[in-house]
Image: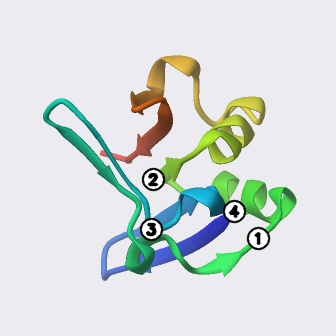
Amino acid sequence: MYLKKHNNKKTEILALCDEDLLGKTFVEKELKLEIQKHFFKGKKIKKKEALEELQKTRNATLIGKKAITLALHSGIVTKNQIFYIKKIPFILIFEL
């Protein structure tokens, strides 16, 4: 998986995606899911480090079966939060 952190003055967004999805685009009807390298390609990490980072974040974009399964098994998200485009799972987590 790849993990990249995006920071501005007020918040941090964690981007986590499965390695095999990086750079790909999926289209279903009027919906488009682009897994852009500039947003997702950061540090290549293992599950343990990804989980540690997910447990600390309040804002995240997760894409792919591995990333989503990790978040589900750790209780960070629920199945009701998962969206799919072309059978690719993704979740957006934002603190309001």
Image-quadrant location for residue 8: bottom left
The CA span between labels 1 and 2 is 16 Å
Of pointers 1 and 2, the one earlier in the residue sequence: 1
What's the residue type where badge 3 is placed?
Gly
Q: Image check: 48 left or right of 96?
A: right
Residue 58 drawn at (x, y percent): 49, 53
- Tell us which disc is closer to us: 4 or 2: 4
The CA span between labels 4 and 3 is 13 Å
What's the residue type where badge 4 is placed?
Met
Q: Residue at x 37, y 69 (%)?
A: 11
Of pointers 4 and 3, the one earlier in the residue sequence: 4
Residue 56 drawn at (x, y percent): 64, 59
Of pointers 2 and 3, the one earlier in the residue sequence: 3
Q: Mark 3 points at which residue?
A: 23
The CA span between labels 2 and 3 is 15 Å
Residues under numbered marks 1 and 2 in contact, where contact means CB atoms less than 8 Å apart: no
What's the residue type where badge 2 is placed?
Thr
Disc 3 on helix, strand or loop?
loop
Q: 39 or 51, which is in the foreground? A: 39
Please determine whether, in this image, residue 60 is positioned above or below residue 23. above
Quarter of the image that includes the C terminus: top left
Residue furthest left in the image: 30
Residue 93 drawn at (x, y percent): 43, 44
Q: Name the residue under label 1.
A: 45
Please determine whether, in this image, residue 73 is positioned above or below residue 96. above
Of pointers 4 and 2, the one earlier in the residue sequence: 4
The CA span between labels 1 and 4 is 6 Å
Instruction: Give residue 1's mark.
Output: 4
Q: Mark 2 points at which residue?
A: 61
Q: 24 or 67, which is in the foreground? A: 24
Q: How crowded is mark 4: few (under 14 residues within 10 Å), some or many (20 or more)?
A: many
Disc 1 on helix, strand or loop?
loop
